[in-house]
């Protein structure tokens, strides 16, 4: 696990310095260099020093469980509804009351018990080869039509984006339709699921995939700066925000919550409230090509290029409850 402690406190001493005036201890699985501006501006504005430990989400959750009541963690910051739900189920988060968060963050982007809040979003949309696809899928369910057999690329079933998308389909269409969709995707795969979202987009450039499903920010990033194997030929790719006449495009979250045994709880709440500020929301969009969670905040240029669309406003806390069923369906239909 990578350990990166922000400012003056080293990781080895976190346990002994967990409680201190002007300190907040952050466990984060976000790994974006652009987030540094979030941390430095919060420190400058509040005088609160952020001590940061970075690692993979599951490792951080397991660490918090092992540390128990002695954990120095004040905040867990991670990506995707499935991981936020996993943290809640593991008992490493606590409910909080914050008028700022209740007012700024839409209710569908909050945990039902206020244990986690979404602070940025990514749309999971359909990309396709302009030259080879004349009639792209208009909905997620369209992806399983026979006309797309051998054309579709997607990540593996172990990926949280795949798990949360199927969980949302369960919530919106029911378990039977969700199973039909997962089985139809397997039938239409151009290749065995592999790689990350950028690889699904590169697959269109290489000709291996005609249709791919990926999160919007991977594509927007390649519009903003050079991404190897993608940006140079990005004009070959077009996109569709699915299900615009129905539930809307599925949205992934990046979010966080206050740790169950937070020694600096008040400072932790202040940090989460800062993440909902206009300034922080603009950093999420401008620095990492994400959609702001706060509706009134303007999108960055790269994100705005994707166009306007209808987002699925399903309650993500309800979607999270479907994750075990989604994994069961993946296993049953043979989605690797």
Image (cartoon, rainbow, N blue to C red):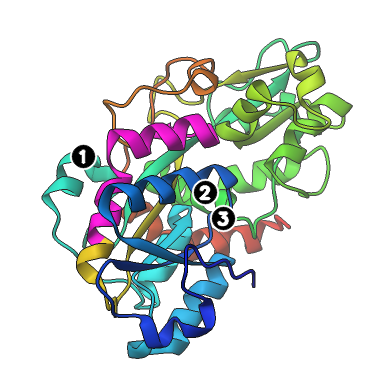
Q: Spatial distance from mark 2 to mark 1, Cα to Cα?
A: 28 Å
Determine whether 44 is above or below 306 in the image. Answer: below
Quarter that holds the C terminus: bottom right
Residue 7 x, y percent position in the rendering: 47, 63
Residue 204 in the figure: left or right of residue 333:
right
Residue numbers of the magenta segment:
269-292
Q: Position of residue 142 (x, y in %)?
A: 59, 28
Q: Look at mark 1 in the image and give the residue it sits on.
A: 104
Secondary element at tag 1: helix
Left-right relation of 201 to 180: right
User: Helix, strand or loop at disc 2?
Assistant: helix
Looking at the image, residue 317 sits to the left or right of residue 63; the answer is left
Residue at image location 40% in from the left, 62% down from the top: 50
Mark 2 — residue?
Answer: 166
Whether residue 271 appears in magenta in the rendering, the answer is yes
* Distance Cα–Cα, label 2 vs label 3: 10 Å
Give the residue at x 47% y 88%.
Answer: 66
């Amino acid at each position: 696990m990578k350990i990166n402690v922000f400012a003056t406190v080293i990781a080895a001493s976190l346990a002994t310095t967990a409680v201190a005036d002007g300190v907040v201890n952050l466990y984060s699985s976000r790994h974006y260099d652009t987030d540094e501006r979030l941390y430095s501006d919060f420190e400058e504005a509040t005088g609160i020093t952020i001590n940061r430990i970075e690692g993979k989400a599951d490792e951080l959750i397991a660490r918090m469980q092992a540390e128990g009541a002695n954990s120095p963690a004040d905040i867990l910051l991670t990506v995707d509804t499935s991981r936020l739900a996993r943290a809640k189920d593991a008992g490493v988060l606590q409910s909080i009351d914050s008028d700022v968060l209740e007012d700024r963050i839409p209710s569908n982007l909050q945990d039902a018990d206020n244990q986690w809040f979404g602070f940025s979003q990514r749309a999971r949309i359909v990309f396709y080869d302009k030259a080879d696809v004349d009639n792209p899928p208009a909905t997620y369910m369209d992806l399983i039509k026979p006309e797309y057999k051998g054309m579709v690329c997607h990540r593996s079933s172990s990926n949280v984006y795949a798990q949360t998308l199927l969980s949302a389909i369960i919530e919106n269409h029911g378990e039977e339709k969700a199973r039909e969709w997962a089985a139809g995707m397997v039938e239409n795969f151009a290749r065995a699921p592999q790689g990350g979202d950028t690889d699904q987009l590169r697959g269109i450039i290489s000709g291996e995939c005609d249709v791919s499903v990926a999160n919007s920010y991977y594509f927007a990033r390649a519009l903003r700066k050079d991404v190897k194997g993608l940006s140079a030929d990005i004009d070959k790719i077009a996109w569709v925000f699915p299900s615009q006449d129905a539930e809307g495009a599925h949205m992934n979250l990046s979010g966080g919550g206050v740790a169950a045994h937070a020694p600096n709880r008040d400072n932790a709440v202040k940090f989460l409230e800062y993440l909902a500020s206009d300034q922080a929301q603009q950093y999420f969009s401008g620095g990492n090509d994400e959609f702001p969670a706060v509706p009134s905040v303007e999108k960055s240029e790269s994100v705005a290029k994707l166009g306007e669309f209808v987002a699925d406003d399903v309650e993500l806390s309800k979607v999270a409850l479907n994750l075990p069923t989604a994994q069961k369906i993946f296993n049953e239909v043979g989605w690797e």
